[in-house]
Image (cartoon, helix red, strand yellow):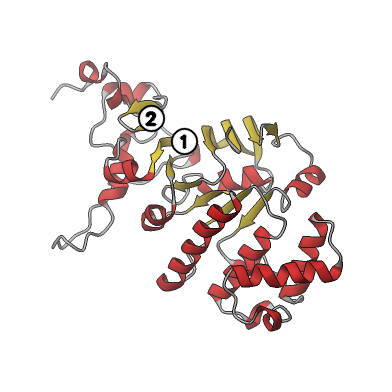
Amino acid sequence: MSLLQVKNLVVEFPHRRGTLRALDDVSFDIAPGEILGVVGESGAGKSITGAAIIGLLEPPGRIAGGQILLEGARIDQLDPEQMRRIRGKRIGAIFQDPLTSLNPLYTIGQQLVETIRTHLPLSESQARERAVSLLRDTGIPAPEQRIDHYPHQFSGGMRQRVVIALALAAEPKLIVADEPTTALDVSIQAQIITLLKRICKQHGAAVMLITHDMGVIAETCDRVAVLYAGRLAEIGPVHEVINHPAHPYTAGLMAAIPDITQDRERLNQIDGAMPRLNAIPPGCAFHPRCPQALNQCKIQRPELLAAAATRAACWLHTNKAETLREPA
């Protein structure tokens, strides 16, 4: 059974000139112990997907359709207080900038102990002992001393380890990690990736890893979901999506990654830009930028179709594709 199920999720932002649809019919699931990567350009809807799952959508954003189920129970209709009890206890969150998650006025220990005691029936001393253990598990040296330090006394990489310790404090079943390595240098990125994989294996937690870095996806994830303009373009095993992309957008993303084995002066790029939310074209949202666009792409939105080992929202993977191709 899937630990997390997202079914036909729709997120909207009402404003005075109408309603912007930031997520449009997005569906996926994550199994216990699995790391699902969510990738796409800036504005594709990655962070909004994570925010909707953990109940932290910025007003006036709202879930306008679909369902989010955690261990088979819906959580998208819970009130803020019910969601607050789930967040931290059953869902942990790791954000891009650890300073947004840590209070500069309190020591790391005070913040960890408060989080632990909020969700677990432990005494002050037991909670502090668990906090030290978490810091040790996440690679903080001399945790018995560092627990009484303030956030500003830690480096960026160490602060991110503290945030991971906070996310793990109540042994959550699901961790939503939003760009957890973006602000870190490459060597620290590798350590954080290794840590996330170890946590997933040891605790059996499911991880939703949001990033724009395909290198991080390749190193970390079991499966990957590619978002474009608030829609799911492709989803499948990470090795297949990276090496045999079935959607032209995924292929464009992969082609844009520099290859040190090739000698070329210019990097590949996807022509054009992702559409604004108030100007998403009919049919497939990617068709104005797609080098393989069909007539059908301009008028009818494709559902996720079987495409070898993955599923892709692309008319190229239907038997009708050849008859619908534009004449030369």
Question: Residue beneath label 1, please?
Answer: 231
Instruction: From the top left corner, tell me how far across and down residue 29 is, in percent.
Output: 54, 36
Q: Please say if the residues under marks 2 and 1 sit with CB atoms less than 8 Å apart.
A: yes
CA neighbours of label 2 inside 10 A, class few (<14), some (14 to 19), many (20+): many
The three-letter amino acid code for the residue at tag 1 is Arg
What label sits on residue 130 in the rendered view? Answer: none
Question: Residue beneath label 2, please?
Answer: 313
The residue located at (60%, 76%) in the rendering is: 140
Q: In this view, does 318 lie to the left or right of 8?
A: left
The residue located at (32%, 29%) in the rendering is: 307
Of the pair 215 and 131, the residue shown nearer to us:
131
Q: Can residue 17 be seen in this view?
A: no
Badge 2 marks a residue whose secondary structure is loop
Badge 1 marks a residue whose secondary structure is strand
Q: Earlier in the sequence, mark 2 or mark 1?
A: 1
Of the pair 134 and 306, the residue shown nearer to us:
134
Where residue 152 sits, quadrant-wise, is bottom right
CA neighbours of label 1 inside 10 A, class few (<14), some (14 to 19), many (20+): many
84 relative to 308, above or below = below
Instruction: From the top left corner, tell me how far across and down residue 175 is, in percent.
Output: 60, 51
Instruction: From the top left corner, tell me how far across and down residue 316 is, in percent.
Output: 27, 26
Of the pair 325 and 215, the residue shown nearer to us:
215
Where residue 265 sits, quadrant-wise, is bottom left
The three-letter amino acid code for the residue at tag 2 is Ala
294 relative to 242, above or below = above
Q: In this view, does 190 lie to the left or right of 20?
A: left
